[in-house]
Image (cartoon, rainbow, N blue to C red):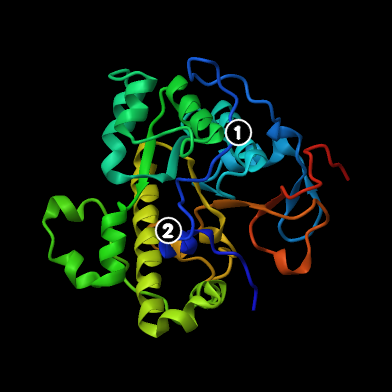
Amino acid sequence: MRNRTLGTFLVLAGTLSMLGCSASNQRSDAGAMTTPAIDGRAVTIRHGDGSGVADWNSVVADMASSRAVLIGEMHGHELGLAVAADLFEDILTENPRALLSMEFYERDEQIALDDYLGGVTDRDGFLKAANRTESNNPLGHERMVMAAKQASRPVIASNAPRRYTKLARTQGYETLRSLTPVQRSLFDIPLTLRTESAYHERFYDAMGGMAAHGGDEMMKGFFRSQALWDRTMATSIARAGLLGSPVVHVVGYFHIQFGSEPGGSGLIDDLREMYQPGERIVTINMLDRVDQAVVEEDLNIADYVVYVGSGNDGLDAE
């Protein structure tokens, strides 16, 4: 069994806020974004199948020609966020039809993004409308939104609002189905929970002692919330494809691990149900390990892997 830290579950459990990860962002006195201090393009990108190092420009070209790009980030990790921002900027240069989708904005915050991108509000107005502060608006995310704004490309608020994932956990999907059409437009209920999948197994494994603490019903509730997140994001990505491609979706890395394997990723399995056979989905995962050749437990975790743990200063080469 592959054991992986489940950042998104920790959000559900209340031990880590997905939007509360802080980063030491470089900003001017007025709070506006300035040139980042970290060069994400200097990292070593590795093929997830263990076949060696991938050239940055080749990776960008691969991503730019795909249907969707899923970037699995480590929340709040400055180097990983710099890599994600640099990738998105270069994908946009390679393919101006690319657009951005983000786990970290919920569907009811779409209007705040649209107002900012369209010039209705300025940065301060956007941050207020989207409930963003220095602690939940890391520089990497802000750079990606700014790149989309400068290129006049959409940014999709792809996630389900927390109040509905809480209902999924505590009361189940039937309660969600009883809501009004306007409310239901803010989330998508999974067609199946895939409780026999490797993703389900890894989810339970990553929860560790929480299962013993809360029992099976609590576990089922948390997985219902996770599945609601995945289905909502997948639907958001698929719909965004009507506006261009690739859709570059930035998300916590657990959601997309081992997505090349059927049943390996709830998000990717859901997305494949909505895509035509053969449409390419490219995945890249940031992992908290010292840079090295891809280790056995990380094989095929994604199409591309970047080790961003201590010791990887972005200057490694092979």
Could you tell me the amino acid type at mark 2?
Leu
Q: Is residue 179 left or right of residue 149?
A: left
The answer to whether any part of residue 268 appears in the image is no
Circle 1: is it few (<14), some (14-19), or many (20+) Cα within 10 Å? Answer: few
Q: Quadrant of residue 39?
A: top right
Quadrant, the N terminus = bottom right
Q: Is residue 51 left or right of residue 240?
A: right
Task: Say if 264 sits above or below 55 in the image.
Answer: below
Question: Gap in Å between the C-alphas at discs 1 and 2?
Answer: 34 Å
- Residue 132 place in picture, x, y as percent: 39, 34
Front in this rendered view, residue 55 or 3: 3
State the residue at coordinates (24%, 51%).
186
Dot 2 corresponds to which residue? 271
Circle 2: is it few (<14), some (14-19), or many (20+) Cα within 10 Å? Answer: many
- Residue 81 place in picture, x, y as percent: 60, 39
Residue 24 bears which disc, if any?
1
